[in-house]
Image (cartoon, rainbow, N blue to C red):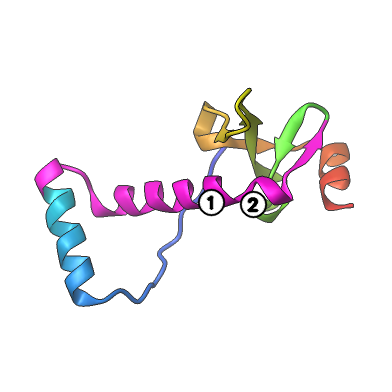
Amino acid sequence: MSNPTRVRNVRVPDTLWSAAAATAAERGEPLADVLRDCLATYVDAHVSARLVTVDGLTIDPASLVGSQAVAYRVTPTGRVKRVSDAGGVVTLTPAQLAKVTA
């Protein structure tokens, strides 16, 4: 299962970009990894309203790319977390895909 990445363009003020790049460098982290983590945290914090459960998988329909989607689990306290394997990316069967997109 692959989760392709593409080059994206974003507009960020120079001061914020420089501060983020310096902080990431101090911590020995690639800035791209930091940005991906921030985006994933943002999505995870706001995704619960659109989740759909299909055959025991809790899926974010907005994350669909082809037959792949991000799967979540809901903790006993109600927090939403990605399933741990491959960043939460799962490949749906045609039947599951039909239910998610219905």
**Which residue occupies 20% across, 75% down?**
14
State the residue at coordinates (83%, 38%).
Answer: 96
Image location (x, y in percent) of residue 16? 22, 68
The relative height of residue 42 versus residue 72 in the rendered view (above or below) is below
Tag 2 residue? 63
Q: Range of the magenta residues?
A: 26-54
For the residue pair 19 and 29, the one nearer the viewer reads as 19
Tell me the crowding category of disc 1: few under 14, some 14 to 19, or many 20 or more residues within 10 angstroms, Cα based.
Answer: few
Q: In the image, is residue 40 part of the stretch drawn in magenta?
A: yes
Query: Cα distance, mark 1 to mark 2?
Result: 10 Å
Q: Secondary structure at mark 2?
A: helix
The numbered dot on residue 57 is: none
From the top left corner, tell me how far across and down residue 22 is, in percent: 12, 57
| Predominant SS along the magenta part | helix
- Of all residues shown, which one is farthest toward the front? 77
* Residue type beneath disc 2: Ser
- Mark 1 or mark 2: which is in front? 1
Amino acid type, callout 1:
Val
Q: What residue did someone put label 1 on?
A: 43
Residue closest to the eye, 8 or 79: 79
Q: Give percent across and percent down for residue 19.
A: 16, 62
Q: Are marks 1 and 2 in contact (CB under 8 Å)?
A: yes
Regarding mark 1 in the picture, which secondary structure is present there? Answer: helix
Given residues 80 and 17, the one toward you in this image is: 80
The outermost residue toward the top is 76
